[in-house]
Image: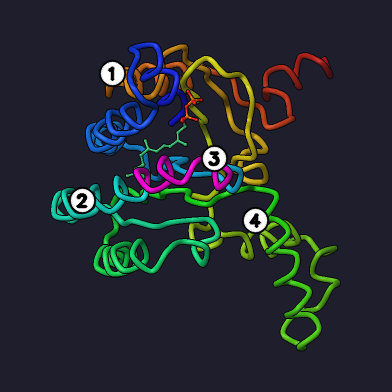
Amino acid sequence: MDGNGRWAQRRNRPRVFGHIRGASRISAVVREADRLGVKALTLYAFSTENWTRPEDEKSVLWKLLIKFLKKEETELARQNVRLRVIGEVDRLSAEVRASLDPAIARLSKNTGLQLTFAVSYGSRREILRAAEAFARDCREGRRDPAELEGKNAESVFASYLWTGDLAELADVDLVVRTSGEVRVSNFLLWQSAYAEYTFIEKCWPDFTPDDLRQAVETYTSRDRRFGGVQPSASVSATN
Ligand code: FPP
């Protein structure tokens, strides 16, 4: 959800004004994702690097998360949305946890759209933590290091990532980045190995359900080969 700060500054408003507007965009986008048949949607709300931001900006972001949960939980429940978070949740304040944890628990049995907020999230950190946890399980006899050489090696390792519980839904199909920045910024690096990317000039506070629909349309027109070739291409090559 990039570009909130710039969106506000261009309007001579404080950066947090952009976050407030950005947070207000979320529910309509979630609804549209569900309507489009998206099974899992991850919103990058706060990165491990964002901890270096000024205290007052961070405090507004946490308040917005708490407010979102209070305002939207009933609607998310009605939509059968399962809510998750990924990231270093142990770094979040007791106040944020007190609002987040019960909401996640109450929505945990839902079977519709899997909505994930990435908070205090960094993909390198996620991969390091997965490696640590796997090594610990090996030391304590629950795992065998040889499993990382077997045919299920990737799924074994992926089960240690914060997205492990999503199983096959953890593999990202499409990344939509707003605000004109063309970089990956430590987001779902393992899970996006074969993702399609789309970069949108608009900043997140201007992002609409229709922008999501267009991004998904662009995605469906892409030719995804996962490093292989089309069956027809392989036939013609051997003819
Ligand atoms: C990136 O834009 C955005 C963020 C760091 C925060 C995104 C968070 C929200 C939209 C609200 C949080 C609420 C919920 C419900 C999760 P930026 O500030 O880095 O923009 P810039 O690159 O223009 O400075």
Q: Is residue 91 left or right of residue 107?
A: right
Residue interval drawn in magenta: 50-61
Q: Residues within 10 Å of mark 3 (few under 14, many from 20)?
A: many
- Position of residue 94 measured from the top left corner of the image (x, y, whole percent): 38, 69
Residue pictured at 47% horizontal, 15% vertical: 200
- Return the mark for residue 210: 1
The three-letter code of the residue at mark 3 reads Val
Disc 2 to disc 4, how far (Cα)? Answer: 27 Å
| First along the sequence among labels 2 and 4 | 2
Disc 1 to disc 3, how far (Cα)? Answer: 21 Å
* Relative to 58, residue 231 above or below: above
Q: Secondary structure at mark 1?
A: helix
Callout 2 touching callout 1 (CB < 8 Å): no
Disc 4 vs disc 1: which is toward the camera? 4
The three-letter code of the residue at mark 2 reads Leu
Disc 3 to disc 4, how far (Cα)? Answer: 16 Å
Disc 2 to disc 1, how far (Cα)? Answer: 20 Å
Disc 3 vs disc 4: which is toward the camera? 4
Q: Is residue 118 left or right of residue 210?
A: right
Q: Nearer the viewer, residue 103 or 218?
A: 103
